[in-house]
Image (tube, rainbow, N blue to C red):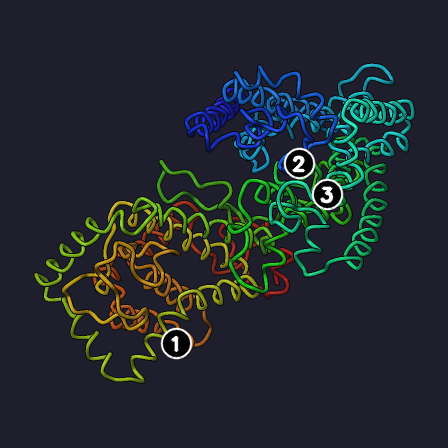
Amino acid sequence: MRLGLWLVAALLAARQLAAVLTTPPGERLTALETWVGPGGVLHVSGSLYDSTEYTGTPFSGLVLKPFTRSAEQALGWGWTFGTLLLVVALGTVAARALPRPVGRRTATLAAPAAVSLLMLSLPVRDTFWLGQTSVIPVLLVLLGCFAAPGRYAGGLLIGLAAALQPTLLLFAPLLWFTGRRRAATATGVTFAAATALAWAAMPRDSSTYWVHHLAGAGLGGPADDLANQSLHAALLRLGLHGLPEIGLFLLLGAAVLVLALRRAVRYAHDGQLLLAVSVTGCAAIVVSPTAWQHQLLWVLLSAVGRVGTRARDRLVWPVAVVLVMTLPATMMLPNMAFLHPVRDNVVLLAALAAATAVPFLSRASPCFRTPAPTPYAPPVPARLAAVPLLPFLRRVLIRPNLLLELLLIRVTYAAYAQVRLAATGGSNSAGRARAEEHARQILDLERLLHLDIEHAVNHAVAKVGWLREFFDFYYTSFHFAVPLTVLGLLYWRRPVDYRWARSALGFATLLALVGFWLYPLAPPRLMPGLGIIDTVHGVQDFSQPEYGTLTALTNQYAAMPSLHFGWSLWCGVVIALIAPRTWMKALGLLHPLFTLSAIVATGNHWLLDAAGGALVVGGGFALTYLLQGPRAREAVAPDGAAGSRPPLPDPGSVETGRPR
């Protein structure tokens, strides 16, 4: 397994190198090009900060200038491979710094897993792409805390890191309050000496950086840019400016520093020095005037902290951190105006939470190594002898963690949307001819089966105003609302059934994705010459390669199978099986009927698309039955005998795993 993980890390590294080195020279390593390329700021005789494109400290400029010629000659290969070696070293040091005792499996797999996560993280990918040096300060701090021999060497390394990134001076009080006072002193002296050396060599640049720009504030892009994930930038994005913003920033920054350092010292005394280092680094992100994306690696390191006394909660924090640090914020949260303050500051909020609020467990806690177990129902036999039940699909008698469910559902849907759009080459025009050819095949098959009713139904509905408005509203409003409502009610009232129903929906969606990829299909409304009225989106201009109001958002040719009908059928089946009243079951079954009428009447699907949707939903339920066993009609105590039939559970008691 260790060899396999190192192979994964190597493949990720090769992919990253290929992505950088195969990009045209003018589009890659732009930051490095700005520094050392022809006409770069490190070549000029004037100030480094004349163009505000150079954002490093004067000391970093002083260090980089002697390497200007060699860096220019090896611009690309040398710098990229050097960055790769730094990332591998960083992952290895972080893996060796895990709090003791460390299990054999963890010790074996930690290093390749850490390197793989670093390769996937947005800061490292940004560092590779821009040619930044932001991995170096993080590595220097970790080496200073965990690998440097003697009493002063660690402080020397951390001082050099602070000379490159001034907010890392926060590690000096961490060293001081954890008993490494000589190292803390060495940190301050090294930082002062390096800064003084740069001031003596480049007095004008040092004055510009430290006095005019207040330790780099205002350099680079606009301070309120979304790439700046500091508290200062967040306040600017919220509309605060001038003295009120500065005063609030200083007040909140001081509170964050006090809380974060107290927590970091406590974790260091508890034997979790790596967690203490990551908490301090997260505080440095928050209080820095500018914290660009390539400087945010400290948040990823905070995943080593353990949160939650129950096994079902243990994965929430590391999963949230990994998602935040590896996926764009637009994939984490939907594009809704009231969520923009959260979406625009998601990395800052993660850093702020790690520094001040997340209740990381102490090693003295009995749940640190052995969390409270999750109650499981007795295992059921596999449906087929050759197909074992998947362990992570075992029937659990309690609700899954809500935050983890929301994160996974949102990220899964975002990935589904991206793959769905990529099925036609990333644009609708790329797959237009193929999709229209497939549509003609579907129409011919429907004519053969005497099912070609789309044109007649569409024109009949379009002539009746209230009926047209009803189906338009039903098509646009109920597709997401009803499945989310069903999932929410199941989570709240029937947690055992929630897991079964959610798995079936997930499998059905994955099967539909295969259909979108293999068989792009134009809906009736996008078929030239067919005469279908697009009642929802308006008149289409078929002379344009890209047309329709939604072409920029989704793949218009993902019509087979119809998930509009598939998800509605899933809702109908689940409601019919679980609802306690007959009228509820009937109402649930009406939803797929109305959806089928809506998708045909509005011209958005062929009738056979609904048949495809029914097939993938049936496949989803079949895979769930095959891999997870039959639906639980009653909750079973985790220590009960297999085949026992206790009474139906009370929803409140199911949460605790106790039978009624």
Left or right, 73 with reference to 295: left
Residue 26 vertical position relative to residue 597 in the rendered view, above or below: above
Element type at mark 1 = helix
Give the residue type that dot 1 points to: Leu
The CA span between labels 3 and 1 is: 60 Å
Q: Please tell me how crowded label 1 is: few (under 14), some (14-19), or many (20+) other residues with Cα within 10 Å.
A: few
Could one spot residue 450 in this view of the protein? Answer: yes
- Judged by depth in the image, the label closer to the viewer, 2 or 1, is 2
Element type at mark 3 = loop
User: Which sits in the foreground, 422 or 544?
Assistant: 544
Give the residue type that dot 2 points to: Asp
Q: Locate residue 372, reporting x and y percent.
A: 69, 45
- Judged by depth in the image, the label closer to the viewer, 3 or 1, is 3
Residue 564 vertical position relative to residue 160 in the rendered view, above or below: below
Residue under numbered circle 1: 587
Residue under numbered circle 3: 217
Q: Residue at x 46, y 33 (%)?
A: 27
- Judged by depth in the image, the label closer to the viewer, 3 or 2, is 2
Q: Residue at x 43, y 44 (%)?
A: 381
Give the residue type that dot 3 points to: Ala
Could one spot residue 365 in this view of the protein? Answer: no
Residue under numbered circle 2: 50
